[in-house]
Image: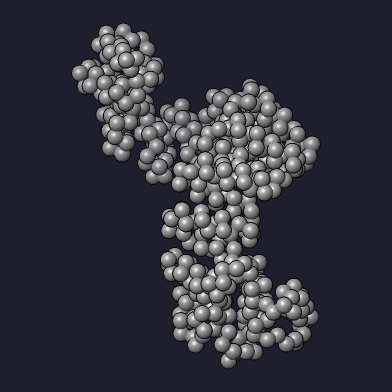
Amino acid sequence: MFDDDNFLDDDMDVNELVDRFENMVKEHQSCYFDADELNVILEHYLQQNNIKKANLAADIAIKYHPNNPIISIIKAKQLLANSHAKEALSTLKNADLDRDDADYLLTLAACYSDLGENKKAIKAYMKAAKEFDFKDCEDIYNFIAVEYENLGDMENALKFFILGISKAEDIDNQYFEIRNCYSILHKMDDGIEFFRKEIDRNPYSVPAWMALGNCYVRLGQLENAIDQFEYALAIDPHYKKGYVDISTAYNELNRFKETIETVEDAMRYNAESPLLLCLYGEAFAKTGNHEEAMKIYKKAMKMDENLPEAYAGIGFLLSDENNPKSALKFLKHAHTLSPYNTDYMYVIIEEYNRLGEYDNALKFVNEILDLNPYDENVYISMMECHVLKDDPEKAMESLERGLLILPNNAALLYRKAFLYFAQDQTESGLLTLEMALNQDYDGHIEFLSFDAENLTSNPAIMDLIEEYRIKNKA
């Protein structure tokens, strides 16, 4: 809720208070604490998310100091901690309290926040900051940043996350929030500049180097990202997340040998993790060593039996080995553990199609559709399922459904043209092909691969493609 130090006299030590309180509880002794002291103890436990002890401190305060005005705030905090924000707000509003008191304002703001009344929360937090003359208010600024984030106001969220950086409970998470704001605002170049300044301020900050690297990841500049991750690992060769991020980048770049070397470095520093092992397994799988990859995935699974990447990795291996039934067992379990990962679902769809279980495949197509109706691949998968079911009408409907959501999508238009040609509807096929060529001329290469023999032997198709080749060259 707030920084303990803001509510303590110089001679009152939080740890000493808490130790005295815990000793009283442990020894079942009776020990006097005034209301202000119990408020500080309560706040300490709330910051530790120890609701049980927070309730105990609040109960003692209410029992022994029922007439102290601060008890209304303590009651409100207790209600809030136990998910009764509406009752907490009512307690504050009905109490005879100083409406300019910082503790009152911070508790009020927290109530509004829990109730989703973000603008009112911001107003209360800002009033509280004013009570401190806007000095040492970094923790309050972080609360304000979250409220702006919930409102979708990323400009102000970014401003307050930066103002609150020195009081961040978790600097990695704070940097993530700042990076996320820059990304949503499409200002990642500014993000890079910000993190470079953070590094200039503290050249040995591993989180700053990692954050800078992840800015480059967001820009798709993986080579630059790797350079930053390498600096971070040079500073702290035991940093597990650094090995995960750099190995992920290497795998994305198909630099699997370097992934293997990186993971083996991590092992020397005892920085092994289940997720890192999955990246290690992927590197072996991609270089054709399926036996070693399987061993590694199983090792990762033993380290963390709820790691979806381990089950998916084995599923992908079995899929590559043309063992769809076994692949499905592992992929479906990975899906259970990570239900929003569409990569897993697309492979499940492929495996069901291999088995001829097209209706089961379509169930997963519809799951993806519910998650992301703007994904062109979901309409392509739907079309493919219906083609395999020998239902060209439903296949065409799938593409038309996608084009309603994604008008003029070239990938969908090329497939629609192909279906027309497959049904000898040449005129409609040529009109649709022209629309596709107009959107993405290079897409014709994939289009011709759908049925190279028949499509390339059709003069009307090839003449139209040639026309657009000349047009694009000009």
Position of residue 398 measured from the top left corner of the image (x, y, whole percent)? 31, 33
Along the line of sight, the residue nearer the viewer: 34 or 126: 126
Above-or-below relation of 145 to 470: below
Q: Left of 277 or right of it: where is 120?
A: left
Residue 380, position in %: x, y?
A: 37, 30
Nearer to the camera, 277 or 367 = 277
Q: Residue at x 56, y 25 (%)?
A: 320
- Residue at the image point whose x is 50% and y is 77% from the top: 88
Question: Left or right of 345: which side holds 16?
Answer: right
The x and y percentages for residue 388 are 37, 26
In the rendered image, the vertical position of residue 64 relative to residue 376, given as above or below: below
Of residues 335 and 260, the one nearer the viewer is 260
Q: Is residue 292 visible?
A: yes
User: In this view, which residue lies farthest toward the bottom?
Assistant: 67
Q: Quadrant of the N terminus?
A: bottom right
Q: Quadrant of the C terminus?
A: top left
Q: Residue furthest left?
A: 427
Q: Residue at x 75, y 87 (%)?
A: 30
The quarter of the displayed image where residue 270 is located? top right
